[in-house]
Image (cartoon, rainbow, N blue to C red):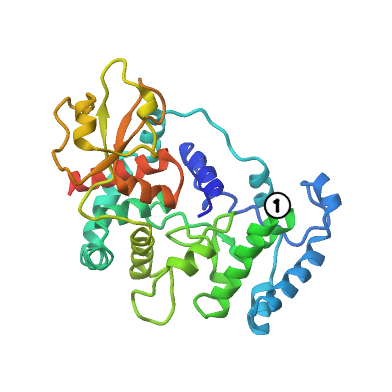
Amino acid sequence: MNNWIKNIALACSVVGISTAAMGVSSLVHLPGVSSVAHAEEERPQFEVYVETLKDKAREHGISEDAIARAFEDIRFYERAVTADRNQPERVLTLDTYLPRAVPDWKVQQGIEKFEEHRELLEEVGAKYGVQPRFIVALWGIETNYGGYTGNFRVVSALATLAWEGRREEFFTRQLMQALEIIDAGHIEPEQMRGSWAGAMGQTQFMPSSFLSYAIDFDGDGKIDIWNSFPDVFASAANYLSNVGWKDDVTWGRQVQIPAGFDQEQAGLSIKKPLAEWQALGVRRYDGSDLPTRDDIEASLIIPDDEDGRIYLAYSNWDSLMRWNRSNYFVVAVGHLADRIQLGR
């Protein structure tokens, strides 16, 4: 998913709302009158704009049948425009964020889901080189294990946000890619549902990520990240595999630093062997020595300040940042994965 969209989702999750779950009842038909008024005076009417999108779809090579089906019941989502213009801002710390992002019930459900799908998860994990607990953790953080995937029609949401104009090029491109997915027969337009920003299915992939990483693991000829657990798990694992995931290391670990530590040493761009961090006084959170593996380089991450949680970030931290460029998101996924492992 695009980074700014992910950050909105992250902020929403703090107050117990997923972007997928937001605005289920916020749908309106083509607007004659809308409360998102002033900027609209400079934009064409939505129904007129939709005709230009259809022309772009034809230029993009989308079939007339797919265009007709995708735009048959096109709708304007006022809620999507409102959400895009009013991105939530909150002052957070990991100590306040983590209990809400990874509550005990989510951990317990993650353990149960792992056991329920163990055979499939282990098969997928072995094929793509991703530990199954991280597949489950991503699934849990993104959509509460498929419980909140969004009820916005993706074509309508993307058309609405393209019309809004603030990120017209991005959302128009995503819309064309959504139409490619429909044209290829993977999903019917009315079943292609997701968040107000167009993130789809149990993996919350934008259409561009779907086309790049989604997998037909169950072999039925369609990629279904909405309903097929094999496709959901394999798609998430394939994404991680393609952005450098390593299954012989974890994501990172919480550590402590000595008083007076030079915080100029912190940041993902600075990589040092574990032995070097050890020499600088960095220790595990319980005060014991760092692992002695000489094949691991790590970065020191201070998401809040030196009085908050501090982590050594391994290479898989970087991979999770490719999914969502938020340290809080990475910690939530890693924390959930660790608790699932401990609880099994």
Q: Secondary structure at mark 1?
A: helix
- Number of numbered discs: 1
Give how far across and how far down residue 331 sits, in percent: 35, 40
Crowd tier of the residue under label 1, counting other residues whose Cα lies within 10 Å: few below 14, some 14–19, many 20 or above:
many
Closer-to-camera residue (239/50): 239
Q: Residue at x 57, y 75 (%)?
A: 180
Give how far across and how far down residue 292 sits, in percent: 13, 38
Q: Residue at x 43, y 60 (%)?
A: 202
Give how far across and how far down residue 233 sits, in percent: 34, 64
29 to the left or right of 123 = right
Q: Residue at x 73, y 53 (%)?
A: 164
Q: Which residue is mark 1?
A: 78
Amino acid on which the number 1 mark rests in the picture: Glu
Q: Residue at x 50, y 55 (%)?
A: 1
**Res 283 seen here:** yes
Give how far across and how far down residue 69 sits, in percent: 65, 78
Residue 60 location, quadrant = bottom right
Q: Is residue 259 above or below residue 64?
A: above
Residue 107 location, quadrant = top left
Residue sitting at the far right: 41
